[in-house]
Image: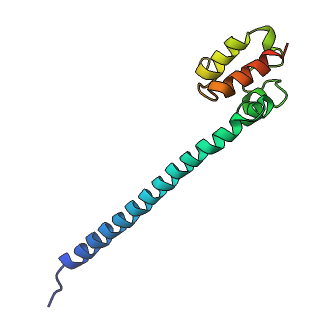
Amino acid sequence: MRKNPVIPFAIIAVLGIVVMIIVSAAGINQREAIQNEEEGGGEKHEETASANPEELFQNQCASCHGGDLGGGAGPNLQEVGSRYSAEEINDIIVNGKGSAMPAGLYTGEQATKLAEWLAEKK
């Protein structure tokens, strides 16, 4: 007497469906955790609003422009104040420049503080 060949396929299908449900539930939990982190990240971003301009620079800009403003992947900013005004620097920080300088690293008060600090570099 031969066993029904459909039963192994049915077992595999049921196991596959159960695994998909488990993985989906885990994904939903991860999405919620990421959303909570982003909301918490907003609070962290607010903390940096009170940071001094040099800290703002070290947090987002130093990786490309160098910790001493000497350049690297990004241009040298040691004498950027002699090339651009604070308003122009603020515009570059907020809107980016070309494909190398991303937009929106800082906005609002943070961008203004950082631009004024950089404009003093002459």
State whether residue 55 is above or below residue 12.
Answer: above
Residue 99 visible somewhere in the drawing? no
Residue plotted at (36% across, 68% down): 19
Q: Which residue lies furthest to the left in this view?
A: 1
Could you say where residue 98 lies in the image, as x and y percent from the top left? 60, 17
From the viewer's side, name the closer residue of 4 and 55: 55
Q: In this view, does 26 lie to the left or right of 100?
A: left
From the viewer's side, name the closer residue of 66 and 9: 66
Could you say where residue 76 lies in the image, as x and y percent from the top left? 79, 20
Residue plotted at (25% across, 77% down): 8
Residue plotted at (65% across, 44% down): 44
Residue 50 visible somewhere in the drawing? yes
Q: Quadrant of residue 67?
A: top right
Residue plotted at (16% across, 87% down): 2
Identify the image quadrant of the C terminus.
Answer: top right
Query: Exactly how many numbered labels are in the figure?
Result: 0
Q: Is residue 12 left or right of residue 73?
A: left
Q: In which quarter of the image is residue 59?
A: top right
From the viewer's side, name the closer residue of 111 and 68: 111
Q: Which colour scheme is used?
A: rainbow
Could you say where residue 22 lies in the image, as x and y percent from the top left? 38, 67
Could you say where residue 101 lies in the image, as x and y percent from the top left? 64, 23
Identify the image quadrant of the N terminus.
Answer: bottom left
State whether residue 102 is above or below residue 97.
Answer: below
